[in-house]
Image (cartoon, rainbow, N blue to C red):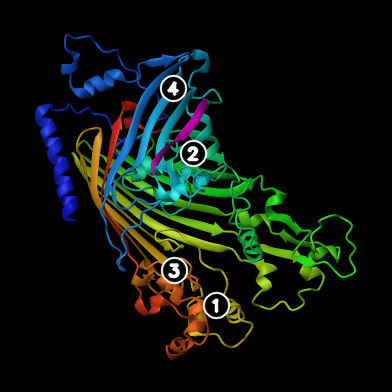
Amino acid sequence: MKNLILLFTFINSIYLFAQEVNPPTKEVIPTTENAPLKQVEQPLETKPAEKTENSSSQPKEVIKSNMQNDLSTGNYKLGLDGIFFPRYESRDRATNGRDDATGSTDESTGFGLSRTYLNVRGKSTDEKYEGYSFRLTSDIAPIGKMGDGCLNNSCSQSNPYTMYMKYAFVSIPILKRKDTFIRIGQQHDPTVNAQSRISLQEDAWAHRFVARTTWEDIGLSPSVDRGISIFHNSEYYAGHFLLGNGEGPFRNNGERINSGFANPELSVHRLSTGVNDSNGLSLSSLVSIIPTGYNKKNILSVNFPFRFENVHGVSGNETQFLAADICGNQENLPATAIVTTLNAPNTICEYSQSGVPNFSFYKGTKRAKQDYSYGMETDYSLNLETIKFTFGVGTVYKVDRRGEALRLSRGLLYGENPNISAANYTSYYQTESDRIGNANYLLSHIKWLDYGLFFRYTFGSAGTSLGQLGTRSSKSWAEQVLEQDSKNNILGDFSYTDSNRLDLGKAIFKSTILGATYQMTSDFLISFGVSESRATDPVGRRARENSLERVPTLPGSSATGRNLSEQFESNQSFYSYTGNYNRLGYNLPGQFSTNEWLGKEMIDRQIFIRAQFIFGAVERMSERN
C-alpha cells in the first residue's frame, strides 16, 4: 500500500510540474467516460492549421487537433487516433501466502498494459457511397493468449507482448438510411460493446480501463468476434445483432473441435457436455429501449443482451466420429506361420488373427453445443454541467445445454468386455441434464468536476475460477447420491467425503470493485482502487486454499499431483501410508482433502492504479466507427 501511495504521489508531482512549465488548454471534448449518447460516429471535420511564425508555441492540445483527420487516400478521408491503458498492480499475497498469479495469460503484479489501440478510420468522400466507412485497429496482448501461436515450449519461458489486429471491418449503410448499417469483419460483440446508441461498456459502465463489462468479466462473451452484423438507431429504441464464429479474436472457427478425444471416457463426456469448439455460427445481440429519447440530461435505458451459440452450421462430424486401429499390439508369430519374406519381423499385428480391427464409434447430440445466455440491464444517467451520475442494475442467466453420448467398441460388440461395472460404464455411455447459472450485479459512478468514484458488485453461481459465472446441477439430491455411491461398485458405503462432492446449488461467487478517479487532462484519466472476489463451494463451504499448494512436486515422483497438497490426496500416498490415513478416519483412497485440515478462505484481492490515455478527438468522442 505504501508503494502505491508513493507511486501515485510521484505521478501527480510530475503532472503539477508539467502544468507550471506549459499549462495545457482543456478542450470541452467528452471522454469515453462522460461521452453523451450519440448517433453512429461521423469523422470530425477540422480546419487546416493556420501558419504562424512560431507554431510550436501554440498549446499542445491545439496542435494535436490541427494534426488529426487531415489525411486522405483515394475516395476515403482518413483519421488516426488511439488509446492505451497503462497500469500498476500491487503484489497482494493470497491467504495461503501465494503471490499474485503471473504467467502467459495473467499479469497481476508490477507495471503493465491492458490495451494499446492504434486506429485508422476511413469514411467515403464519394457521394455515391455516402456513409461507407472502415476501421483497422491494432492492439497488443501477451503471447500466451494467442491461441495456437503458443503451443511450443518457448512461450512458457518468454512472454513478451505481441501486436495483433483487434478490429478490421467495413460498415455499409442500407435501406437508404443513415441510421441503419451492416458491418462485415472482425468487430465488436454487442453484448459487451454494442455499436448502436447504447453500449453497456462505453455508456453504462464507462470504466473499461479499470475493468471489463460484466458479461465479458464473468466469462459469457468475448468482446470481439468475426462475422456480419446489423445495427439500427432511433429515438426510443436501438439494436445491434451479430452473426459470428463465436470463438472470439484469438481462435479460428472450430479450431479446437477435436480437443481431448484421445481418452475414451473424456471423449464421451465432451460429447455429452458439448464443450469443444464448433463449426457453427453464434448469434449475439443487444436490444435497447430508451424512454427518454434524445434527452441528454436524463438518460434512461432498458437493455436486453442475449447470446445463442451455434444456431447454424453444426456439422455431423462434430457429434459423431469413428476411430480405428487395424493392428493393435505386436504378438509373436504362431508356430504354424510360414514366412516367405526375407528379413521379416518375428511379430505380427494382434488383430490380424481375428480379422476384426479395433475401433470406437462415438455419437453425441447437437443440442449440447447450443448453450445460450440472456439478461436485462437498466441504466439511468444524470448529466449536469458540473456533475455526472450513473446507476445501473442487471441480471443474467446462462443455460448450459447438454445431452447424451455413447461409444461402441470392438470389445463391447464382440463380448470381450462382458462385465461393465458402475465404475467404467461412463466410458461407454453418459447422459447429462441441462445446467443453469445466474448472476446479478449493480454498478454506479459519479463525477464532479475532475474527480470521480466508481463501484460495481456482482454475485452469482460460482464457476471453476473466482469471479466466473458457473452453472448448477439440475440433478436431484437422490440422483447425485446414487451416482456417487456406485462409483466404486459398492452400494451403501456413501461417506462424508462423498457428500462433499454433491452439488447442492450453493456455489456462489461475490466480486467487488471500487475506487476513485482523477481527470488529469481531457486526455488522461487515472484511477486508484481495489477489487476482491470470494466464493463458496457447491455444498456451501467457503472456497479454500492451503500453503502446501505452494510446494511444487519434484520431477520423477510416483505420486500424482502438481504440488505437495495434491500428493497427500493421491491414491499412491494413501496406499503407502494407509495406517496414518486410517487414524484420521479415511478408509478409502480419494477421500482425504488437504484443505479440510489446513485450508484458509480463498480471497482474490487486487490493489491497483489504472489509467487511460487517449489521443485523437475521434476516439475521445466514441469508439464506434
Helix, strand or loop at label 3? It is loop
User: Badge 1 local density, few (<14 within 10 Å), some, or many (20+)?
Assistant: some
User: Circle 4 sits on which residue?
Assistant: 122
User: Badge 2 local density, few (<14 within 10 Å), some, or many (20+)?
Assistant: many
Name the one closer to the observer, 395 or 90: 90
Q: Residue at x 50, y 48 (%)?
A: 152
Task: Name the kind of residue labelled 2 in the image.
Answer: Gly
Question: Mark 1 against mark 4, which lies toward the viewer?
Answer: 4
Q: Earlier in the sequence, mark 1 or mark 4?
A: 4
Residue 448: name its quadrant.
top left
Q: Earlier in the sequence, mark 3 or mark 2?
A: 2
- Image coordinates of residue 8 in percent, x first then y, are 17, 46
User: Circle 1 sits on which residue?
Assistant: 477
- Image coordinates of residue 38 in percent, x first then y, are 37, 32
Q: Earlier in the sequence, mark 4 or mark 2?
A: 4
Q: Could you give the CA–CA distance between mark 4 and mark 3, rounded to whole angstroms?
A: 48 Å
Q: Main secondary structure of the magenta part?
A: strand
Helix, strand or loop at label 2? It is strand
Helix, strand or loop at label 1? It is helix
User: What is the magenta range?
Assistant: 160-172
Question: Mark 4 against mark 2, which lies toward the viewer?
Answer: 4
User: Circle 3 sits on which residue?
Assistant: 507
Task: Name the kind of residue labelled 4 in the image.
Answer: Gly
Q: Could you give the CA–CA distance between mark 2 and mark 1, rounded to whole angstroms?
A: 42 Å
- Image coordinates of residue 416 in percent, x first then y, are 78, 73
User: Circle 2 sits on which residue?
Assistant: 239
